[in-house]
Image (tube, rainbow, N blue to C red):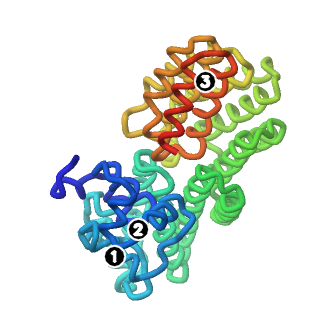
Amino acid sequence: MESELDLWVHPGLRAAAAAEDWPSLLKAWRKLTRSSQSKLGALIGLAQSDISAIENRRREVTSIEVRQRIIDGLDIPTELLGGVPSEMPLPSLVLPHLVADPETERLRRITASGMRLDAPSLAAMERLLAEHRRAEDTLGSRVMNSVVAMQFEAVAGLYGQARGPLADRLVKIMAEYAQFLAWMAQDQDNASVALGWFDRSYDWALESGYGDMAATTMSMKAHMAWSQGNGRRCVRLGEAAASTAGASEVTRAMAVQMAGRGHALEGDGGAAYRRLDEAQSIIANAADAPPWLYFYGESWFAAQRGMADLHLKEWSSAVTHLTLGLTGFTSTFRRDRAWYGACLAHAYAGAGEADASLTTALGVIGDASEIGRPHAWGELHKVGGLLLRRGAHEGRVLVDRLAELD
């Protein structure tokens, strides 16, 4: 068990406090202290059933009294808190665990004092967004969504100050924020919210002449179609994204591989691998990626190829490509490691390697539970089901472990 002194140094707990994401905060606190829901309830003056309802998002913490009970009972340092109850002032636009610098301080002053928008302020916004994209890789979309949404509202509120080139640049940043918010909604399987943000991002991209972002938004809609099992629409949207005027080579590569994955979903291996080969050729010769595609490279592409192999039941090839992709993801990419690790476990199960499948699944089950829901978590359930259907006892081990963490 971690000491009270060390507890609030934990980045996941700090981020949950900053976002006032009470379900994630309570779960993280219990995990770090190895406490039951009953013990936690006793500390903050709530019944075990209330704790369960909050943690499972059946009940929201809307009461100022309950909020204060949590703060007092868990001794949360007040400087970490970043929520917006009605009695409180507008919170900081940055997570407390990120190092402050002159640019983020400038952005704080813009929202606090209403100073005029200028180019250095826009640079601060761009830097802040880049930092939080990377934070989301580690902390997950559930923690980051409310923080980024608050940032977006502050940024969008500056539009009335902007004129000429500053207005164009601000609208481009708004398009990037909308794309990020769409991605996080999609990551939480909230398709209707994601589509709304994608549409706003696309409109602002066109308004500001930002062809690369317009193509990215279209490509991410293709990804959504893929995740919903609609291969034909995935292909059409991927091809449309690839032909969008102003798309960079890296963005085109992403779009072309999405079309390839759509073909794989439809069972057309020939078309899938042709498009994937084309995308690999593009990415091998591409220069700089746009800031929101900082993760895109050969490792990520190998993992995507492994995804196509999965659809086509090319199990051995899927194992090879997913393993290669995972070697290129650092430990900070917790969500992606959980997702592709779950897919690798699926590939091993399909190949009849039950022991390797279980070992791989158990290696990512913690991150899948904490920040990989619903996608990586759902994939691990598929793995357990496949192993059980094949009569492997490893399937029962995995299913039981998943049940423990549910």
Q: What is the spatial separation of the Cα atoms under label 2 and label 3, in whole angstroms? A: 35 Å
Would you say the residues marked 2 and 3 are in contact, meaning their CB atoms lie under 8 Å apart? no
Identify the mark at residue 283; answer none if there is no mark.
none
Could you tell me the amino acid type at mark 3?
His
Sooner in the amino-acid sequence: mark 2 or mark 1: 2
Expressed as whole percent of the image width and height from the top left, the position of residue 272 reads: 75, 24
Residue in the foreground of this view, choosing between 14 and 64: 64
Q: Give the residue number, with chain letter if any, for mark 3.
A: 346
Query: What percent of the width, then of the height, locates residue 239?
Result: 77, 38
From the viewer's side, name the closer residue of 238 and 328: 328
288 versus 300 height, above or below: below
Q: Give the distance between the C-alpha atoms of the residues marked 2 and 1, in whole angstroms.
A: 13 Å
Q: Is residue 243 shown above or below 109?
A: above
Q: Which residue is mark 1?
A: 69
Q: On screen, 250 above or below 109?
A: above
Identify the residue at horizontal 57%, vertical 25% (top origin): 396
Between 332 and 158, the one nearer to me in the picture: 332
Task: Check disc 3 and report its element: helix, strand or loop.
Answer: helix
Q: Residues within 10 Å of mark 2 (few under 14, many from 20)?
A: many
Q: CA distance from mark 3 to mark 1?
A: 43 Å
Which residue is located at x 56 percent, y 40 percent? 377
Q: Is residue 144 left or right of residue 184?
A: left
Task: Determine which quarter of the picture holds residue 249.
Answer: top right
SS for dot 2: loop
Name the residue rendered at 32%, 53% in the picture: 35
Q: Which mark is residue 20?
A: 2
Q: Are marks 2 and 1 in contact (CB under 8 Å)?
A: no
